[in-house]
Amino acid sequence: MGERFLDIFEARDISTTGVGITVPYRFEGCELGNPVELVITLPGGKPFLVKGNLVHRSKMESEFFGVQFIDLGETERDQIAKFVDERLRADNDET
């Protein structure tokens, strides 16, 4: 959610400091440093709200935004860390 938009996106990557989202179209007026609010839903978890700032923007097959979290709570940080650890272990088990 930003100043002029509300939409649902898939995350390309996530860490305890931020998330990368792929946007299938260009957001006019979305500039670096703009604040956004995101509802993060991890598999098997409860959705939670987090605030962040747009800190990176690039064009690939579509727009890609990097969002740095600015108010991530300890519980939410732990949920993300657990998710990332589980994904890394699963990737290592596949190799």
Image (tube, grey):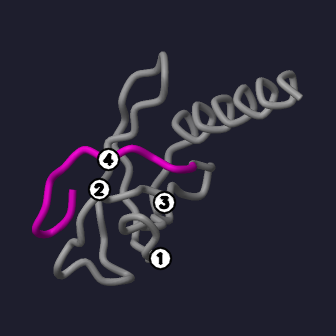
The residue segment tinted magenta is 1-13
Residue at the left extreme, as displayed:
4
Q: Which SS class for mark 3?
A: strand
Q: Residue at x 68, y 36 (%)?
A: 84
The local crowd at label 4, few if under 14, some if 14 to 19, many if 20 or more residues have their Cα within 10 Å, is few
Disc on the earlier residue, 4 or 2: 4
Disc on the earlier residue, 2 or 1: 2
Instruction: Specify the amino acid type for callout 3.
Output: Phe
Q: Position of residue 54 (x, y in %)?
A: 40, 73
What residue would you read off at disc 3?
Answer: 69
Q: Nearer the viewer, mark 1 or mark 3?
A: 1
Instruction: Specify the amino acid type for callout 2.
Output: Glu
Q: Is residue 8 left or right of residue 54?
A: left
Q: Residue at x 36, y 68 (%)?
A: 63
**In which image quadrant can residue 71 be found?**
bottom left
Q: Compared to 48, does 66 lie above or below?
A: below
Disc on the earlier residue, 4 or 1: 4
Magenta stretch, main secondary structure, is: loop
Q: Nearer the viewer, mark 2 or mark 1?
A: 1
CA distance separating discs 4 and 2: 13 Å
Q: Position of residue 11 (x, y in %)?
A: 45, 47
Rendered image: mark on residue 9: 4
Q: Residue at x 89, y 29 (%)?
A: 95
Rendered image: mark on residue 37: 2
Instruction: Specify the amino acid type for callout 1.
Output: Val
Q: Position of residue 79 (x, y in %)?
A: 58, 31
Q: Which SS class for mark 4?
A: loop
The local crowd at label 1, few if under 14, some if 14 to 19, many if 20 or more residues have their Cα within 10 Å, is some
CA distance separating discs 2 and 1: 14 Å
Q: Which SS class for mark 1?
A: strand
Residue at the top extreme, as displayed:
44
CA distance separating discs 1 and 3: 10 Å
